[in-house]
Amino acid sequence: MEIYEMIELEDCPRCLGPSILEEENSGYYVMCMDCGCQSATFGFKDDAGRLEAAKRTAELWNAGKVIFNGFGD
């Protein structure tokens, strides 16, 4: 099973748009596909830490802890 299938994401707490879990440079973050706000990035060093990093960033996102830089719709 892919990590993306194991992680439950709420809609964007700012605009209620759809969210997506992204992996970049050995780290995960969640981003809104409508307004562009995102969560903090949690890094990982190996496969053992990969799922934990994805869970931690999803947890922050689902709690409404997002960064909005003013870009997007």
Image (tube, helix red, strand yellow):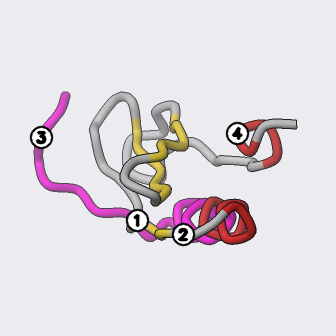
For marks 4 and 1, the one nearer the N-term is 4
Rendered image: mark on residue 41 = 1
- Say few, some or many: other residues with alpha carbon within 10 Å of mark 3 (under 14 / 14 to 19 / 20 or more): few
* Residue 42 in the image: above or below residue 47: below
- Say few, some or many: other residues with alpha carbon within 10 Å of mark 4 (under 14 / 14 to 19 / 20 or more): some
Residue at x 40%, y 65% (from the top left corner): 41
* Bounds of the magenta segment: 55-73
The reply to whether discs 4 and 2 touch (Cβ–Cβ < 8 Å) is: no
Q: Amino acid at mark 2?
A: Phe
Q: Return the residue at label 4.
A: 4
Q: Relative to residue 68, is residue 16 drawn left or right?
A: right
* Image quarter (top left, top right, bottom left or bottom right) of the C terminus: top left
Q: Nearer the viewer, mark 3 or mark 1?
A: 1
Q: Amino acid at mark 1?
A: Thr
- Say few, some or many: other residues with alpha carbon within 10 Å of mark 1 (under 14 / 14 to 19 / 20 or more): many
Whether residue 71 appears in magenta in the rendering, the answer is yes
Separation of residues labelled 3 and 1 (CA atoms)? 18 Å
Rendered image: mark on residue 71 = 3
Q: Amino acid at mark 4?
A: Tyr
For marks 3 and 2, the one nearer the N-term is 2
Q: Position of residue 34 (x, y in %)?
A: 34, 29
Separation of residues labelled 4 and 1 (CA atoms)? 15 Å
